[in-house]
Image: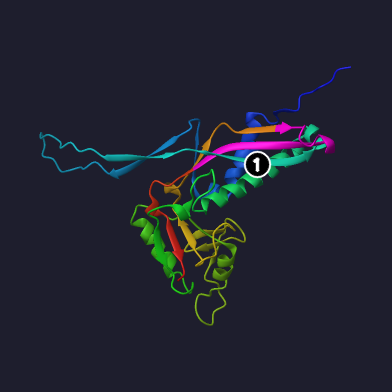
Amino acid sequence: MSMTRTTFGPVLNPETIGDLVIAPLVAESIAGQVLTEVFTESPQHRIPIVGTDPSASWVAEGQEITVSDAEVDELIVSPKKLAGISIISSELANDSNPAAANVIGDGITRDLARKLDQALFSASSTNGPAGLPGLSGVSTVSAGASYANVDAFSDAIYTAAGFNGTITHWVTNPATAMALAKVKEQTGSNKPLLGADPTAPGRRQILGIPLLTSPYVTTTNNPVWGISKAYGYLVIRDRVEVESDRSVFFSSDRVAIRAKVRIGLGFPQPAAMVKISTA
């Protein structure tokens, strides 16, 4: 009679990890939707920042062209470890059909996505990256005492444009989004100020830009973040691990599934990110 004593080891191969963990993490998290994802195998990812472009000039035929250099700096992003644990039964762990793999991947992905979004909208995270509220140099726009119209959002768009940014998403907390949804085009009208998004039923737009919600955006002063995707990076280190351990919950015949991924946030042009808030 043979006995197996192995209790710890990989549960998903690299291809499956990509399909069940990385792809849904990017798709389901707010961070994955509003930031530009970059994959790296290095412990550090360098984002170039062009301070001053090279200078061109009109030159007479046959004359030397004036040499000018660009001023280039860099932002170094060091991905931090984000880990989550999901507990499943041994029967499910031993099931090799695609449905079982999807259940494992879904539970892990939801946990990772929550932690990632929490970091994005927090000034700092213990052992994790700093998010938008802690970013120095972010542009700000005041909406006054309350959101009565879209003027503040229009101001935010042009403020970002002043720093070569294009706002691609608005993100706020659900309570503020609910209040915005009740604002009407004008007094006596029942037509909501927020427009419908034809590509996503139930989702709203402000001046043609999608409005997303996250419970991790603070409710203090009802902030709405205007995010320029071109200047926000979600850096994901390629070496993702998903492993199982049968020894931790031996008495209940359950299996612990642990996922680890290293993720960093980078904002090379903070002024292209706009925070709108009420007084």
Q: Is residue 264 left or right of residue 250?
A: left
Q: SS of the residue at dot 1?
A: strand
Q: Quadrant of residue 247?
A: top right
Residue under the image location 47 percent in, 55 percent down: 133
**The residue stretch that appears in magenta:** 244-264
Residue 279 belongs to magenta span: no
Main secondary structure found in the magenta portion: strand
Q: Residue at x 60, y 44 (%)?
A: 25
Whole-percent x, y for residue 188 in the image: 54, 82
Which image quarter holds the N terminus? top right
Where, quadrant-wise, is the C terminus in this rendering? bottom left
Q: Is residue 225 in view?
A: yes
Where's residue 272, x and y in %? 39, 54
Give the class, few, some or many, for how many residues have Cα within 10 Å of label 1's Cα (few <14, many ≥20): some
Residue 264, placed above or below residue 95: below
Q: Which residue is mark 1?
A: 84
> Front-most of 35 and 245?
245
What residue is shown at x 47% (from left), y 38% (from top)?
78
**236 sits left or right of 159 in the view:** right
Find residue 175 and report its horizontal and vertical position in percent: 59, 66
Indicate the amino acid at tag 1. Answer: Gly
**Residue farthest toward the top in the current orientation of the protein:** 1
- Answer whether residue 263 is magenta in the image: yes
Whether residue 30 can be seen here: no
| Image x and y of residue 202, in percent | 62, 61
Front residue of 117/129: it is 129
